[in-house]
Amino acid sequence: MSGSYLEQVVQPDTRDTDIPPRLLGPQLERIWGTPRGLWGFLTTVDHKRIGQRYIVTAFIFLAMGGVLALLMRLQLSGPERRFIDPDRYNQIFTMHGTNMMFLFAVPVMEAVAVYIVPLMVGTRNIAFPRLNAFSYWMFLIGGLVLWVGFALDMGPDVGWFAYVPLSGPQYGAGKRSDIWAQMITFTEIAALAVAVELVVTILKQRAPGMTLDRIPLFVWAMLVTAFAVICAMPAIMIASTSLILDRLVGTHFFNPSEGGDVLLWQHLFWFFGHPEVYIIFLPAVGMISSIIPTFARRPIVGYLPLVLALIATGILAFGLWVHHMFVTGLPRLGESFFTASSMAIAVPNGIQIFCWLATLVLGRPVLKTPMLFILAFFFTFVIGGLSGVMVASVPFDTQVHDTYFVVAHFHYVLIGGAVFPLMGAVYYWFPKITGRMMSERIGRWVVGLVVVGFNLTFFPMHILGLQGMPRRIYTYQPELGWGPLNLFVSLSGCILAAGFVLFFFDVVRSMRSGAPASDNPWQAATLEWATSSPPPSYNFSRIPVVTSANPLWDATILPATRGLRVERRELLVTTVVDAEPQARESSPSDSIWPFWAAVTTSVLLVSSIFTPWAVVWGAIPVTFALIGWFWPKSTPEDLA
Amino acid sequence: MIRRFWRRMAWIVPLACSACGETFQSALQPAGPHAASLARLIWSFTAICGVIWLLVMLVLLFALWRRHRPAEARHERRATAIIGAAVAATVLIITGLTLMSYAATRGLSDDAPDPVVIRVRGYQWWWEVTYADRRPERTFVTANEIHIPLHRPVRLELTAADVIHSFWVPNLAGKQDLIPGRNNTLTIVADAPGTYRAQCAEFCGLQHAHMALPVIAEDAAAFDTWRQAQLAEAPAPVTAEQAAGRDFFTAGPCSACHTVRGTSAAGRLGPDLTHVASRQTIAAGQLPTTRGSLAAWIADPQTIKPGNNMPLVPMTPDQLQSVSAWLASLR
Ligand SMILES: [Cu+2]
């Protein structure tokens, strides 16, 4: 009814002020909405739909990686167990690490940002939305390639950092390492794309008035993360490409007998690999900084120090990589420098912890599930941070490097530091994304199970490492005395797994029958809570105007802009520093081409594992897809 | 249900601690000055970090405990000062830990006078060991076992033939990688006699889990006796069976991969077997050396250590008997 009326009313260059407020929503929905069905599914460029499927996919990879972890714990539960043969075991631990780092941790953080950041900065879609769609398809296909390889007994088996020469042409037989290296290419393309979109969204699409000092901390964290991605990825791209070239066309980048160097790989890999840890951790810092003020019922203490700490961490993260190489025999002086720099990163991390604690002390914390996850974070992450200070010391590290101590350390940092806040963030933003609340009662059980299960599983690993147990061994002899503790670890792993199962159960249950959520169920302060739950396809019927750092707490009625066109997808571009309105900008419509571009690129990348000529022939369909993608519109882009 | 589970778990804890008792591969039971200084460092870091963790938890508990009282402006001001102080304390502690770390590194100096020099070369999945001496005729090659004299620094020169490995004998020192195309060194000193287990600590492929090596620390006299014995060629066969074993070994494929000094076998793809029976273990720490285990290994190396680089060499039961009898006599 309103649809046909709108068709008559809405002429080119209709502004939101030209139609009755009652009809603004339906009209925007007509323009921004995604059609139902498969076609809509394949063509949508809505950041919320893409973000949602990104998140779901990443969590499915988490579950699959978790199953691998349980298989490893089964094999290690006693000395000389023979459940899994060494060949499979090596594939399993490589898959576990690769999957968790490249297919879960990094993508899931970016995915949450893809969903939340545009809402938090008050815009209608992410910048470069078609690139966003392309990114998701690349990520999905890359993940499938890896897992199909594993199912066909072609899973990589050289560890998630694939040290040469083991992964090189001489020792890494078959196509296993090629699959690993190409999977890297897939996920790097996906990650880089999202990073670029986030940078532009954050710098140019903030709601008017959202000056630099009013940007929500999660958005700051994602900005720093996105820059870190952009700076770190080239190193790994060079590394994995050189590896593929060594394997495929016989270059000798890493072959010492032909003038190559095996340590070069480690430098390149860790120049990326260490920032990678912060690419995972910084978004978590942002999530914590969003959850704490909401549940402490007060603005964050130390906004500026927190922002500076984020930036400092992002920069320092690039000066630490050598601490992964302390036992490769580098010069003393170099090692001392990297000890100092690795220790130094404890300072910005300390600042963050202190500011959060101060916020809690000065606020009146309400212990809802998201907040409980933050408490779990403190309990666990601080241990991981402190064991990080330990391994930063060269002499200390020579005893624990490549042992279960390090396994314990990085799980404390990654699970305690990133996954707990992430689970808190799921409980926190779930009502916004689905319009339904998750269960508080189940949530408490989930927190309890994962915290207890996690610590019982991973704390003893510190001891095992000091008792001499190296990582990545598929079995050990009974005389070594590691059996009982390993059994304990394996059994505790089941508690942890139960916690995750319950978590997934709660997600599925709440999605179907959770209590309906209001627009702002936690009484939070940031813009994503200003729109409905779930948000409409256009996010905000009018772009809000921000006058403080906590808009929903400080303004009873949020002022809004007017004058955007409603008969095409249009959003507001603002200045970088002051977020002053600068221009109206059209936002791309749905398109199937990002999907085809991803499919053709994937064909090229996968077949290049088998022959270098695939790069030549495969480029042809990619070209067609890109031509389709960038085909000039029949109507001129900008009328106004 | 959870409680019942816990009751059932309770028996595991004492068991776990029984394992902390006697071990021969542990960083926490140092048997030499380097490892001892590292263990001291580990314990001091642990103590300091433990205190910090407790403090953070106390502040957190405090925050939860006072959560129903509204904060006042003066609290806010005080909070800023406290954060500042905490950051300053962090900087101090970090500096202190860094200095402790440097001090510990200096204690592990590599240039000790008159060291025993041992070259260790990592192979997938065994160790070639060369005792170097200024006089070439006193240099010899062995495998998968190291003897060192007590109280004397031993300089290990580490390199690798194929992929990266890492030499780690936690009771004596921290680890150091063996990297193809590079030479690393590591100095170890033992103060207490005993057998300490070293294990490869860098993932090196299929049998990374089974790449160990006993390090035997003994007094100077015992060490010299051992060294003298190792210098000798393989003893001549005594029985007819042993002689048949030797002939089979030198004539067949075994000699293409293994060296036995004093015979024509001079292969370099597998461990030197000149005194294989004098070593505590075979297959890089996997089986104790006995005639039986030698026979089992030769009969089917791929079941004992799947994927290792020694193929199954077909032979008759008699040949197996004789070759293992001969190898068991190579003391
Ligand atoms: Cu090895």
Image: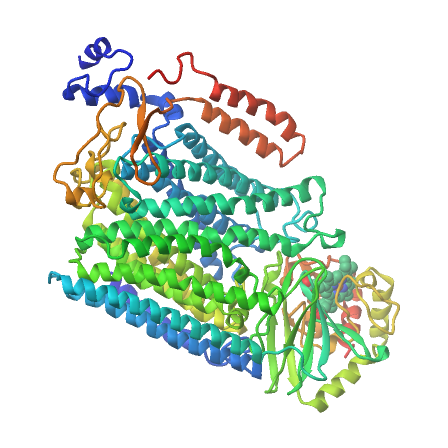
Residue B39 higher or lower than A531, as above or below: below
Relative depth, front residue between A149 and B244: A149
Q: Quadrant where the C terminus of chain A lies? A: top left
Location of residue A356 with respect to A524 vertically, above or below: below
- State the scheme by which the image is colored: rainbow
Query: Residue A131: x and y, percent?
Result: 44, 30
> Which residue is farthest bottom?
B221
Residue A159 appears in view: yes
In depth, the one of A95 and A637 nearer the eye is A637
The residue under the point 57% across, 40% down is A182
Residue at 23% over, 46% down? A549
Q: Position of residue A565 (x, y in %)?
A: 27, 20
Residue A528: quadrant of the picture: top left
On the picture, is A420 further left or further right than B164?
Answer: left
Q: For residue B284, what is the image quadrant?
A: bottom right
